[in-house]
Structure formats: C-alpha cells, structure tokens
C-alpha cells in the first residue's frame, strides 16, 4: 500500500464517523464545526488568490465567513453581514489607490472581487449548513444524507470515469472529469439516497430522488468551481491540510454547493 493511499484511508477512517456524529448531535457541535470549516476554507482561498497576485486581507477572508456562520446560528440577518463585508473590502481596496503613486487601476476590479469571494463563496454557502441543521426536526439527518450523497457521487464519478470515461466534461477546468463520470456520480448519489431512505430518513421517494440528484449536480458544479479557481491561481491543491486529500476546500467544495439545494427542497419547497 502506498503512503499516499494509507494517508487517505486514515483521514477517511477518522473523518467520516466524526462528520456523521457532528451532524447527528447538531447544535453547538455543528456550530463549532462550521466555524472551523469556514475559517480554514476562507484562509485557503485567500492564500490561493494571494499567490495569483490579488490584493486582499487574509484576516477578513477568515473572519467574515465565520461571522456569517455566527449570524445564521443566532438568527441575525445575514444581509447585514454581507453589507458590512462589502464596505470593509471596498474600503481596503480603495485605500490601496490613495496618493499620487498609487497602484495601476487595471487590477482594481480583480482586487475587489478577490476580496469579496471568500465571504460570498465560503460565508454565504456556510450559512446553509447551519440553516439545514437547525430549521427542521430532522436537520441532522439531512446533513448526514448530504454527506453520504456527496461521498457516493464522488465515488460513482471516479469509477464511472475510469471505466467508461472518454468524452471530457469540462477539460479546460478539470481535465480528468468526464461525462461518464458525471452520470456515474448521479447513480452513486441515487444509491446513497435509497440507502438513506431505507435506513434513517423518513421522507417521500420523490423528495429523496430530487434531493439526491440536485445535490449531486450542484456538488459537481462546486467541484468544478473550486477546480477553476485553483487552475486560475496555478495551484494543484487548496492546501496540504489533509494528508492524501489536499486541502479543506478540496474535500468540502462539493458539500458547500450541495447543502443549499437540500435545504431548499427539504425546507423551503416543502
């Protein structure tokens, strides 16, 4: 067994049961997890964007997503946090151009967007982890369902791509992803949905199928978004925080995009 594979298996053996327990116990456990996840993901994103030469404040890239999580948990309007974030980031970017010897304006819009991406990408998506966990009696089980769907979709995409993958899905963003892998991911997600329905999630079959397919599709979109950011920033992994797996964002990019659609189907649509 290679050292990389051993590391991957060890991280999975510890991480999977831990994430399921956090989801089931919910409450403050979920809050702490979401804060740590948002902070680390924001930090990784800031590091990648810094490497590409964008001007942004790493502290704000960490603290603003965390404030989004706290506002969702304590029922404070997140729109106010978004407005505060816009004001703070805009002020810092504008300050860079003060004085007669200021920087070239050609990078102004890029710096502004780079400063806002952590709060829009990480902060805004993170709030739905909290919303899903606290707004229904079975929120914790829905989080477990989302994790299982994302993991099964990832596994299905891997096997489908290796067995039948010829036509590329989005070669310029992620050369290894294939159309066969995409459909393999959907099959894996549906299998996880069926298992969830039969074992612990008492929802109708239509809800299960819709959530599984939607979470899989948006999870793969999230994977491609993060791959596009890494490709733009010319990095292979978001970090090396998880041995054998890359960074935090590398492991949770699909989950971040899957959670909101599960929330909207299970809570808002219902």
Image (cartoon, grey):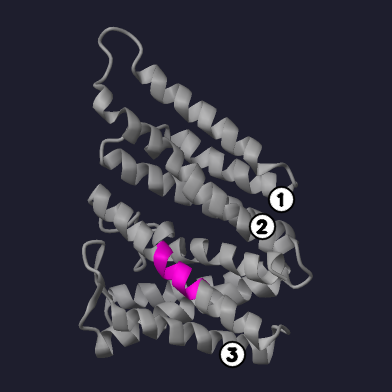
Residue positioned 52% across, 89% down in the render: 191
Dot 2 alpha-carbon crowd within 10 angstroms: few under 14, some 14 to 19, many 20 or more: many
**Residue drawn 46% across the image and 68% down it:** 219
Name the secondary structure under disc 1. Answer: helix
Spatial CA span between label 1 and label 3: 30 Å
Q: Secondary structure at mark 2?
A: helix
- The residue lying furthest to the front in this view is 269
- Which residue is disc 3 drawn over? 194
How far is disc 3 from disc 2 in space, using C-alphas? 25 Å
Q: Which residue carries the number 1 mark?
A: 73
Q: Nearer the viewer, residue 203 or 247?
A: 203
10 Å crowding of disc 1: few (<14), some (14-19), many (20+): many
State whether the magenta stretch is mostly helix, strand or loop. Answer: helix
Report crowding for label 3: few under 14, some 14 to 19, many 20 or more residues within 10 A (C-alpha): some
Q: Quadrant of the N terminus?
A: bottom left
Query: Where 216 sits versus 225, above or below?
Result: below
Choose mark 1 or mark 3, whichever is in front: 3
Residue that carries the numbered disc 2 in the rendered image: 130
Q: Is residue 179 left or right of residue 249?
A: left
Say which label, 1 or 3, has the lower sequence index. 1
Percent x, y of residue 172: 21, 62
Q: Position of residue 189 (x, y in %)?
A: 49, 82
Let me know if residue 17 appears in the view: no
Tell whether position 217 is magenta: yes
Label number found at residue 187: none
Residue 192 % position (x, y): 54, 85
| Residue positioned 53% across, 27% down in the render | 87
Magenta extent: 215-222
Quarter of the image for residue 84 reads top right
């Amino acid at each position: 067994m290679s050292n990389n594979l051993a590391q991957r298996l060890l991280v999975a053996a510890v991480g999977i049961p831990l994430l399921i327990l956090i989801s089931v116990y919910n409450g403050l456990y979920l809050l702490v997890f979401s804060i740590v996840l948002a902070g680390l993901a924001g930090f990784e994103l800031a590091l990648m964007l810094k490497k590409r030469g964008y001007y942004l404040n790493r502290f704000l890239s960490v603290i603003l997503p965390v404030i989004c999580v706290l506002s969702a948990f304590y029922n404070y309007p997140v729109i106010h946090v978004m407005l505060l974030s816009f004001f703070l980031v805009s002020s810092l970017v504008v300050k860079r151009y003060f004085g007669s010897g200021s920087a070239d304006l050609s990078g102004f819009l890029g710096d502004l967007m780079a400063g806002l991406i952590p709060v829009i990408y990480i902060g805004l998506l993170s709030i739905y982890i909290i919303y899903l966990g606290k707004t229904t009696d079975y929120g914790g089980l829905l989080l477990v369902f989302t994790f299982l769907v994302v993991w099964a979709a990832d596994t299905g995409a891997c096997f489908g791509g290796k067995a039948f993958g010829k036509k590329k899905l989005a070669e310029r963003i992620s050369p290894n992803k294939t159309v066969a892998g995409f459909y393999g991911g959907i099959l894996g997600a549906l299998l996880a949905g069926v298992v969830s329905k039969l074992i612990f999630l008492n929802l109708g079959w239509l809800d299960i199928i819709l959530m599984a397919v939607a979470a899989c599709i948006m999870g793969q979109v999230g994977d491609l978004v993060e791959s596009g950011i890494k490709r733009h920033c010319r990095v292979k992994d978001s970090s090396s925080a998880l041995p054998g797996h890359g960074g935090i964002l590398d492991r949770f990019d699909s989950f971040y995009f899957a959670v909101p659609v599960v929330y909207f189907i299970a809570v808002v649509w219902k």
